[in-house]
Each structure stands twice: as C-alpha cells, then as structure tokens.
Amino acid sequence: MRFIKSTSLVLLVVGYTLAGINHFYNPVSYYHIIPHYLPYPVLLNILAGGFEILFALLLIFPKTRPWAVYGIILMLAAFLPVHITMLMNAPLKLGNLTVTPLIAWVRLILQPVLMLWAWWHRN
C-alpha cells in the first residue's frame, strides 16, 4: 500500500506541475473557457497556473502537504464554474482538443474524484 500511495503522490505532483506549466505555455487555450462573468481572464489564468505549481511543490514536503491538499481542494472547487460553463457551451475548442458534451461531463465528474485523490494525501 505504501508503494501505491507514494506513486499516487508522485503522479499528483507531476500532474499539477505540468498542468500549471501549461497555463503559461499555452495560455490562449484557457482564456475562452473562463466564464465571461469573471473579470481579468489573463490574470485568472496566471493565478490558476501559479497555484497549481505552488500546490504541487507543497505536496512534496510532509509538513506542507496538508496545506497543499486543502489548497488543491479549494482550487478545484473554484474551477467548477469553468467546467459547468464548458458543459453548457460544448462542443468547443480547447487548444487542439474539441470538447464534446461527453468530454465536458467527464471533466466535471472528475473534479470530486481529484478532490478525493488529494484528500487521501492529507496526512
């Protein structure tokens, strides 16, 4: 079980790091999925990418891991309007990917799964 949990933690760290980097590497693909009622999409994208990287780094250290877990859960909750908007506007383009209604549903349903995955690493 220890191997599985360690591997899971590494996957979280790598996944959130890469996701955060992608906000800076390919920012334009994120701008149009930010709901129109939220101001400053460029700033919101920078903050999202920065927090994903920050929380990934905080996951590495046992003393900061609980803070990272709570941060990830709050961040994923904050992302819910994006996923709901994607579902309402599907099909749409996200970079080179066409987000169909099915993909939008999967992305939305994955949010609580990702929250639980992070929660598993709180201790």
Image: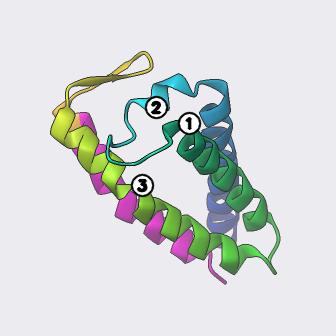
User: What mark, if any, has residue 75 been given in the picture?
Assistant: none
Residues at marks 1 and 2 touching, judged by CB atoms closer than 8 Å: yes
Q: Distance of mark 2 from mark 3, alpha carbons?
A: 13 Å
The percent position of residue 33, horizontal first and vertical second, equals 37, 35
Segment colored magenta: 103-123
Q: Which residue is mark 3?
A: 79
Which quadrant of the figure contains the C terminus?
Answer: bottom right
Q: Distance of mark 3 from mark 1, alpha carbons?
A: 15 Å
Task: Give the residue type at disc 3.
Answer: Phe
State which quadrant residue 79 falls in. Answer: bottom left
User: What mark, if any, has residue 42 been given in the picture?
Assistant: 1
State which quadrant residue 70 falls in. Answer: bottom right
Which callout, 3 or 1, points to the residue nearer the camera? 1
Front in this rendered view, residue 31 or 97: 31
Is residue 17 visible in this depiction of the protein?
A: yes
Mark 1 or mark 2, earlier in chain:
2
Task: Give the residue type at disc 2.
Answer: Tyr
Q: Distance of mark 1 from mark 2, alpha carbons?
A: 7 Å
Which callout, 2 or 3, points to the residue nearer the camera? 2
Residue at 81%, 81% in the rendered image: 63
The percent position of residue 65, horizontal first and vertical second, equals 72, 74
The kind of secondary structure element at disc 3 is helix
